[in-house]
Amino acid sequence: MGMSALYGEADDAESIATIHAAVDAGVSLLDTGDFYAMGLNELLIRDALRARPGSRDQVAISVKFGALRDAAGGWYGYDGRPGAVKNFLAYSLNRLGTDHVDVYRIARVDPAVPIEETVGAIAEEVQAGRVRHIGLSEVGAETLRRAASAAPISDLQIEYSLFSRGIEAEILPTARELGIGVTAYGVLSRGLLSGHWTRERSPGAGDFRSRSPRFSGDNLDRNLALVEALRKVADGKGVTVAQAAIAWVLSRGDDIVPLVGARRRDRLAESLGALDVTLDDADLAAVEEAVPADAVSGSRYDAGQMAHLDSER
Ligand SMILES: NC(=O)c1ccc[n+]([C@@H]2O[C@H](COP(=O)([O-])OP(=O)(O)OC[C@H]3O[C@@H](n4cnc5c(N)ncnc54)[C@H](OP(=O)(O)O)[C@@H]3O)[C@@H](O)[C@H]2O)c1
């Protein structure tokens, strides 16, 4: 996402080099949304994979669809009607230059369309061979159950990190009961929990973080104090803050895949270092003492976007 939109200036050449470095390092999942820069992120992935013959088969491509945008870049809802699903997918396949998407999911539930109809339309695309697996994004436990009763669901993509632990109460146990894997995004809380964010860094108007309650005012000060507490634990282990934050998510279970939003090769290298970090029971206790489960200040989206989250009902 951040390679094309929502986190300020992006550099296509560095983004493509980062994708190549990721594939070379064995990263096997690329996640996108057809609405990230209105299709440009899919074209970026196409160009990166084309430049490396054979790489398409080395990665699973996960695509979110359904968000409706206007010409000014605004957002005006979600469309999960079966006919729209087929249309969105046809465009994505064309932009990605591939004959199938590995995981396909609506980004947010369309309140006007029963989830059974949306996943049913994706199931038809599975039958046709154009989609391999059906996913969901930011849905709550009840929607997970309804969707899973209509079609086989492989994966739920949802925010999960030391700062965002809301899924632990009900959503994660339900996914586990239903045999649905979790792709955790925002593992670094969009950079806030990376150890690289500072009070002085001021995101531009087009940057999601300029509107995020967690990056604003007193919330930012309180949240950065938590990061400094985590830094002490990370320093003691000889790892970086970002590596500790990713390793914590990795420690939550083999059914949870951390989806890290590295935009540059140096950030990618740092985050891959988390694969070599093992947190034992004492480390986990220290991490959770530094960042207690409910300690973060501010909601994870602004009020308007929170209203679209089925997972927060
Ligand atoms: N399903 C959904 O609703 C949803 C929502 C959001 C995202 N996603 C998906 O999840 C992916 C990851 O989300 P995210 O980018 O918000 O999460 P993230 O991994 O928490 O944040 C990534 C940001 O953290 C900063 N960062 C600092 N150190 C880093 C390091 N060592 N490695 C990587 N990043 C570091 C970078 O910002 P700077 O480059 O500015 O320093 C980077 O853009 C997205 O690309 C998107 O595909 C899904």
Image (spheres, rainbow, N blue to C red):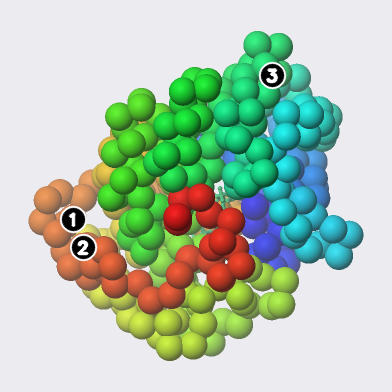
Q: In the image, residue 233 lies at what x, y percent?
A: 22, 67
Residue 15 visible somewhere in the drawing: yes
Residue that carries the numbered disc 1 in the rendered image? 284
The residue most toward the right is 71
Residue that carries the numbered disc 2 in the rendered image? 288
**Mark 3 element type:** helix
- Residue occupying the point 49% across, 88% down: 217
Say what amino acid the circle numbered 2 marks.
Glu
Splitting the image into four quadrants, where does ligand 1 fall?
bottom right
Q: Are marks 2 and 1 in contact (CB under 8 Å)?
A: yes
> Badge 3 local density, few (<14 within 10 Å), some, or many (20+)?
many
Between the C-alphas of marks 2 and 1, the distance is 6 Å
Between the C-alphas of marks 2 and 3, the distance is 43 Å
Between the C-alphas of marks 1 and 3, the distance is 42 Å
Residue that carries the numbered disc 3 in the rendered image? 125
> Badge 2 local density, few (<14 within 10 Å), some, or many (20+)?
some
Q: Nearer the viewer, residue 225 or 217?
A: 217
Image quarter where the C terminus lies is bottom left
Q: Is residue 153 left or right of residue 30?
A: left
- Residue occupying the point 53% across, 21% down: 151
Q: In the image, residue 154 lies at what x, y percent?
A: 47, 26
Say what amino acid the circle numbered 3 marks.
Glu
